[in-house]
Amino acid sequence: MTSILTATANGELHGLINTLTNSVPFDDFKHMTPADKAKCEKEKKEDNRLVKARYINHRGRHERLSKPYCKWSGDPIKQYHLIPGHTYELPMGFIKEVNEPLIKVMKRSGLVSVDGQCLKADESPLDKDMEQDRIHELVPISF
């Protein structure tokens, strides 16, 4: 399988930059009940569907997202490197994984700064607990 690598003017590769073979073989969902097997096959088909999406980084245009993706046994491990403002053709499962983090990161009350950056303009501590803002987001352009 041949793929064309995309690079910026200064030579930074982005998009799908590497594909590795998976040492775990695909088991064809053989240990599942027929209902669960049908559900997983449908979900796998949906996760592998390619969708065009624009990458947004809420910290700024200088930030990047480098992330491997492999959800199902037997699937190749794909390494993505995304640059804000660019449009990529990505699997729907990857988009879901980036947009719906499993762990909600909280900013706790009494906190003054995160990574050396003040949370409030007047540098006072937070009054109450709140969810941290999303950093990475993929906005689907076509379905």
Image (tube, rainbow, N blue to C red):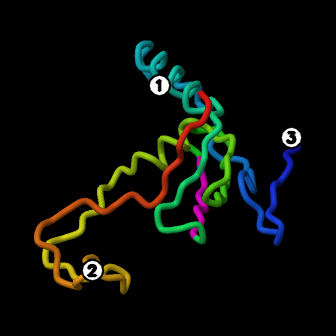
Residue 65 magenta-drawn? yes
Q: What residue range appears in magenta?
A: 63-69
Q: Quadrant location of the C terminus?
A: top right
Residue that carries the numbered disc 2 in the rendered image: 121
Q: Magenta-highlighted stretch: main secondary structure?
A: strand
Q: Is residue 35 magenta?
A: no
| Count of number-bearing discs | 3
Sooner in the amino-acid sequence: mark 1 or mark 3: 3
Q: In 3D space, how far apart are the residues under numbered discs 1 and 2 (Cα atoms)? A: 56 Å
Q: Earlier in the sequence, mark 1 or mark 2?
A: 1
Whether 119 is drawn above or below 35: the answer is below
**Which residue bears the numbered disc 3?**
1
Residue type, label 3: Met
Of the pair 142 and 12, the residue shown nearer to us: 142
Query: Which numbered disc covers residue 31?
Result: 1
What residue is drawn where x is 53% and y is 47%? 138
Q: Where on the picture, by quarter, is residue 79?
A: bottom right
Quarter of the image with the N terminus in it? top right
